């Protein structure tokens, strides 16, 4: 004797009856047939009961798997959205920081350039001696040159003038070289102070940048830990429900209790 495979599907929608009502009705019919000695009908009812229970058990398991998959996908999607939001926020924070840092460096560099030029102009104007200090030999030659010219000894005055001009050029060059060296040394000292100031700014920016990276890493670790905790908790809850479904299937054997086990026994609260 074969059970009609379409029976379960037909009974599920018959008159809008619930699965519990159909199982109870079939079980009652089977019992009555057994008591009345209508064993073929009892066998048919038993097979229909078994078929209906198996059909419903498959539906329950499929629905449970689909529900649990949807729950896991929901957790994954929420986590991915949280990560995307996290990255967007922190990328913007780092972008804003770098823009601010670049602005500070540009502002300081511009100020340094102006201060450097102002300092250089000041040094060239104020560094002593601002004019050459002629030697006694050169001053004597100029006096001799003037005296010879007054005495109308122009030839000798010319020779003396040539010697004095030559000595003046030498002394002027020496004065200029020494003054430029002094100015350069003072300029270098000034530039060194500016370098220290820029170095201090860069060091502070690096500390702030490192702190920002550490804060981002710490928050990322918290997000990942929350996700891992939620995932572990959900998996544990789903295993408990799966175990209950395994322990209390709809396809429980007949006898003893004299009736079908309620569907809710297998899908109780987690």
Image (cartoon, rainbow, N blue to C red):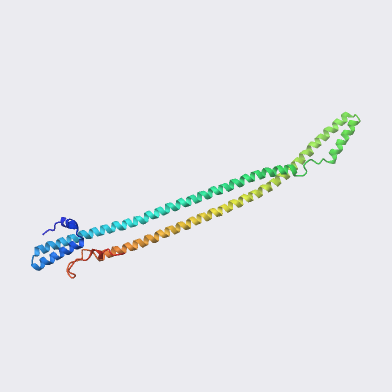
Quarter of the figure with residue 17: bottom left
Q: Where is residue 211 in the image (x, y as percent from the top left)?
A: 53, 56
Q: Residue at x 51, y 54 (%)?
A: 212
Q: Where, by quadrant of the figure, is residue 60 drawn?
A: bottom left
Q: Where is residue 19 in the image (x, y as percent from the top left)?
A: 20, 61
Which residue is nearer to you in this view: 185 or 257? 257
Which of these two is toward me, 153 or 123? Answer: 123
Left or right: where 243 falls relative to 170: left
Q: In which quarter of the image is the N terminus?
A: bottom left
Q: Which residue is drawn at 56% across and 49% down?
A: 101
Residue 232 image-quadrant placement: bottom left
> Is residue 171 visible in this depiction of the protein?
yes
Give the total of numbered labels.
Answer: 0
Q: Where is residue 178 in the image (x, y as percent from the top left)?
A: 75, 43
Of 217 and 63, the residue lying toward us: 63
State which quarter of the image contains the C terminus: bottom left
58 vs 194: above or below:
below
Residue at point 47%, 57% (across, down): 219
61 displayed left or right of 218: left
On the image, the x and y values in percent for residue 203 come to 58, 53
Q: Please say whether residue 8 is visible from this viewpoint.
A: no
Q: Which of 99 and 167 is in front in this view?
A: 99
User: Is 173 placed above or below 250 here?
Assistant: above
Q: Is residue 154 above or below residue 203?
A: above
Residue at x 37% of width, y 55% of height: 76
Q: Which residue lies furthest to the front in this view?
A: 15
Q: Relative to residue 242, is residue 156 drawn left or right? A: right
- From the viewer's perspective, tell me whether residue 51 is left or right of residue 229: left
Most extreme residue toward the right is: 151
The outermost residue toward the bottom is 256
């Amino acid at each position: 004797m074969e059970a009609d495979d379409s029976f379960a599907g037909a009974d599920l929608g018959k008159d809008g009856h619930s699965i519990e009502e159909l199982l109870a009705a079939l079980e009652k019919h089977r019992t009555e047939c057994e008591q009345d000695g209508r064993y073929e009908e009892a066998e048919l009812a038993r097979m229909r009961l078994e078929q209906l229970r198996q059909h419903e058990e498959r539906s329950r398991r499929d629905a449970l798997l689909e529900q649990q998959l949807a729950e896991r996908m929901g957790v994954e999607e929420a986590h991915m959205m949280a990560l995307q939001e996290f990255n967007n926020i922190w990328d913007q924070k780092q972008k804003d920081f770098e823009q601010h840092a670049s602005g500070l460096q540009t502002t300081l560099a511009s100020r340094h350039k102006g201060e450097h030029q102002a300092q250089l102009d000041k040094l060239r104007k104020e560094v002593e001696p601002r004019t050459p200090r002629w030697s006694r030999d050169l001053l004597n030659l100029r006096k001799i040159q003037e005296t010879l010219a007054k005495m109308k000894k122009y030839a000798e005055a010319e020779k003396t003038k040539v010697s004095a001009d030559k000595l003046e050029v030498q002394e002027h060059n020496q004065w200029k070289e020494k003054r430029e060296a002094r100015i350069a040394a003072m300029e270098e000292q000034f530039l060194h102070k500016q370098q220290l100031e820029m170095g201090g700014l860069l060091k502070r920016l690096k500390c702030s940048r490192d702190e920002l990276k550490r804060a981002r890493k710490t928050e990322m670790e918290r997000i990942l830990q929350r996700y891992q905790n939620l995932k572990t908790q959900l998996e544990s809850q789903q295993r408990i429900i799966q175990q209950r479904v395994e322990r209390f299937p709809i396809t429980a054997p007949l006898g003893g209790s004299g009736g079908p086990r309620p569907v809710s026994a297998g899908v109780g609260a987690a």
